[in-house]
């Protein structure tokens, strides 16, 4: 079933082809949905999770020490994630590939590369977020620019890079699945540090930050290091 279980401490969620994974505030994870490939069989003892991602038939979890734990769908190398010294700034998964943003702003991809979705552009840096669609990858850099690569329907260019719309102002990449990317611009992008959703960073946001101090990740993790606390 795709109906979510009763959870009151969720801080992050990701959806794959036919399943979901939720990270709870204490670092545990819960999966539900299709388990045809074992993608909902959370490894016993898995904890201290700070990032999650769900692909098509596989699931990824990043622990506080930077270890990436992957389960099922090993045929395309998805069970061979990179070794990191610290939790990545971001992680996402496509149909059969995955991507992370390292703490230094560089990107690593692994898994299937049938459409060039793992061909990270040479010299790409200063990345703050990445999103995978089925067979392509999009990265957002610190200056607000976006870089895309992988599957594309452009005539004579079947392996990308996938086109990014021109004229976007301060884009914020929200999600990309199945060949579709969802982007907000500066006109509707959330205010960084606005933790209570009133479009203003004020004392109320500080109260929210302090209430979540020491917790794993979530919206109050402003520097993206996997825990709410000193930078």
Image: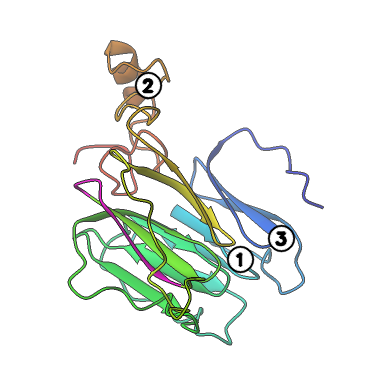
Q: Which residue ends up furthest to the front in the rendered image?
A: 155
Asked if disc 1 and disc 2 are in contact, CB closer than 8 Å, the reply is: no
Q: Which mark is residue 44?
A: 1
SS at badge 1: loop
Above or below 120: residue 206: above
Q: Which mark is residue 208?
A: 2
Res 226 label: none
Asked which secondary structure carries label 2, the reply is helix
- Element at label 3: loop
Please identify, in this view, whether the residue under mark 1 or under mark 2 is nearer the observer. Answer: 2
Examine the structure image and report whether residue 143 is included in the region drawn in magenta: yes
Question: Residue 214's quadrant in the figure?
Answer: top left
**Which comes sooner in the sequence, label 3 or label 2?**
3
Position of 77 compared to 36: left or right? Answer: left
For the residues marked 3 and 1, what is the alpha-carbon distance in whole angstroms?
A: 22 Å
Stretch of the chain drawn in magenta = 142-150
Q: Is residue 3 above or below residue 118?
A: above
Sequence-first disc among 3 and 1: 3
Residue nearest the viewer, comparing 183 with 202: 183
Q: CA distance from mark 3 to mark 2?
A: 34 Å
Say which residue label 3 marks. Answer: 18
- Count of all numbered marks drawn on residues in the image: 3
Work out whether residue 171 can be spotted: yes
- In the image, what residue occupies the spot 41% across and 59% down? 91
- Badge 3 local density, few (<14 within 10 Å), some, or many (20+)? some
Q: Position of residue 15 (x, y in %)?
A: 61, 54
- Colour scheme employed for the rendering of this structure: rainbow
Coordinates of residue 154 in the picture (x, y in percent): 47, 71
Q: Residue at x 32, y 59 (%)?
A: 88
| Magenta segment includes 19 | no
Q: Residue furthest bottom?
A: 75
């Amino acid at each position: 079933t795709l109906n979510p279980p009763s959870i009151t401490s969720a801080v992050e969620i990701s959806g794959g082809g036919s399943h979901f994974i939720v990270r709870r505030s204490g670092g545990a994870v819960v999966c539900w949905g299709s388990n045809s490939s074992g993608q909902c069989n959370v490894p016993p003892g898995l904890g201290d999770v700070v990032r999650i991602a769900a692909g098509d038939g596989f699931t990824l979890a990043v622990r506080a020490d930077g270890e990436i734990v992957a389960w099922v769908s090993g045929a395309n190398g998805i069970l061979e994630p990179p070794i990191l010294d610290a939790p990545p700034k971001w992680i996402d998964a496509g149909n059969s590939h995955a991507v992370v943003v390292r703490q230094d702003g560089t990107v690593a991809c692994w898994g299937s590369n049938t459409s060039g979705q793992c061909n990270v552009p040479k010299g790409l840096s200063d990345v703050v977020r990445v999103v995978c669609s089925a067979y392509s990858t999009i990265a957002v850099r610190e200056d607000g620019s976006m870089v895309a690569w992988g599957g594309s329907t452009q005539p004579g260019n079947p392996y990308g890079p996938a086109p990014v719309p021109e004229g976007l102002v301060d884009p914020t990449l929200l999600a990309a699945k199945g060949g579709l990317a969802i982007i907000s611009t500066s006109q509707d992008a959330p205010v960084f540090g606005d933790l209570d959703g009133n479009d203003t960073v004020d004392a109320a946001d500080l109260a929210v930050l302090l209430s979540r101090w020491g917790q794993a990740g979530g919206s109050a993790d402003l520097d993206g290091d996997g825990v709410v606390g000193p930078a």
